């Protein structure tokens, strides 16, 4: 039997850690809230083309110097700059910042109203709920219901902690971040499914082993794959987070946090829940048979 490390022996300690992280994230969401971006709050968009293209970092400094707090600057392939500001910020401050870099051509200036923002918010919530429902359906078909619930709990655990990290750091949450959260959810489930598949295989060939031993064995057998996948993903995400600029860094933050908590939850949260719930269900069945 090749059980090098008994992960599930420490599941109650990891339960406490997970509960504290989730409760902390929920508390942050209620007290501090999220720094919702232009997509969800409404605001203004200004697109310009300069005669002499300035560095994007200098443009951001100029916008900050004008007192703007919530804005996003993007450089397009066509050589234009798009400046987005949240509702309540002054468009006149954007114009003043742009003037400091010389002559420019105004491509467009438009306002995103609250109706559009509310629709985007509803669609973002619908996208998350649809993804969660599809994942739950897939897991219910592929595995036992208890296993599917365990994987779904791990997924919710990961998403809540990542969202809590955005609340803690007060990073902007926009549609791109919502997309990153859905990818993190998919990553978490994929990692969990690999472990669950190995557990199911070992249950067939090692029928004499206790269920906990089979689970520990399966986690150890998939550990190298889990660690290597997580490390390569984390290294790429961290590099883009550090060097990718403001917009890309904001998205990569979800991956940096999500890969860490996703790996943790696949090994501990999902597997631990399945082990304890399976024992509970089996105990209930035995009690029913004896009564």
Image: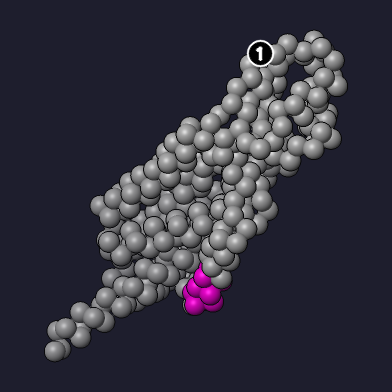
The image quarter containing residue 272 is: bottom left
Residue 248 within the segment the image draws in magenta? no
Q: Number of marks in the image? A: 1
Task: Write the start and end of the magenta stretch as one range.
Answer: 10-19
Q: Which residue is mark 1?
A: 107
Q: Residue at x 33, y 53 (%)?
A: 136
176 left or right of 82 in image: left
The image quarter containing residue 96 is: top right
228 left or right of 79 in image: left
Return the x and y of residue 182 as percentages of the image width and height: 47, 44
Residue 11 within the segment the image draws in magenta? yes
Q: Identify the colour scheme used.
A: one colour
Return the x and y of residue 26 as percentages of the image width and height: 53, 62
194 left or right of 95 in image: left
In this picture, is 167 found above or below 42? below
Q: Residue at x 42, y 41 (%)?
A: 122
> Camera-side residue: 140 or 207?
140
276 left or right of 113 in image: left
Camera sees residue 218: no
Which quarter of the rendered picture does the N terminus lie within?
bottom left
The image quarter containing residue 236 is: top right
> Camera-side residue: 93 or 275?
93
In this picture, is 23 found above or below 161? below
Return the x and y of residue 215 as percentages of the image width and height: 40, 68
Q: Residue at x 71, y 32 (%)?
A: 90
Main secondary-structure element of the magenta-colored stretch? helix
Instruction: Please tell me how crowded label 1 is: few (under 14), some (14-19), or many (20+) other residues with Cα within 10 Å.
Output: few
In this picture, is 100 found above or below 265? above
């Amino acid at each position: 039997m090749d059980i090098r490390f008994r992960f599930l022996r420490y599941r109650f300690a990891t339960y406490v850690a997970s509960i504290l992280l989730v409760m902390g994230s929920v508390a942050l969401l209620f007290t501090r809230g999220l720094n919702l971006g232009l997509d969800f709050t409404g605001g203004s968009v200004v697109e310009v083309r300069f005669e002499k293209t300035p560095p994007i970092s200098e443009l951001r400094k100029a916008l900050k110097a004008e007192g703007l707090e919530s804005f996003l600057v993007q450089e397009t392939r066509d050589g234009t700059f798009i400046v987005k500001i949240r509702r309540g910020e002054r468009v006149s401050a954007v114009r003043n910042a742009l003037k400091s870099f010389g002559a420019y051509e105004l491509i467009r200036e438009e306002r995103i109203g609250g109706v559009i923002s509310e629709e985007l918010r509803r669609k973002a919530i619908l996208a998350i709920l649809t993804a969660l429902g599809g994942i739950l359906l897939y897991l219910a078909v592929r595995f036992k219901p208890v296993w599917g619930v365990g994987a779904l709990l791990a997924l919710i655990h990961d998403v809540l902690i990542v969202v809590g990290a955005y609340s803690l750091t007060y990073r902007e949450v926009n549609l791109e971040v919502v997309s990153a959260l859905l990818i993190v959810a998919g990553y978490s489930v994929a990692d969990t499914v690999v472990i669950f598949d190995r557990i199911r295989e070992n249950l067939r060939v090692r029928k004499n082993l206790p269920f906990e031993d089979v689970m520990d064995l399966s986690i150890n057998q998939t550990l190298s794959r889990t660690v290597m996948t997580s490390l390569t993903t984390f290294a790429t995400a961290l590099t883009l987070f550090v060097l990718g600029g403001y917009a890309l860094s904001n998205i990569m933050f979800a991956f940096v946090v999500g890969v860490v908590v996703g790996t943790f939850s696949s090994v501990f949260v999902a597997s631990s829940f399945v082990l304890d719930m399976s024992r509970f269900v089996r105990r209930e069945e035995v009690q029913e048979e004896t009564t």
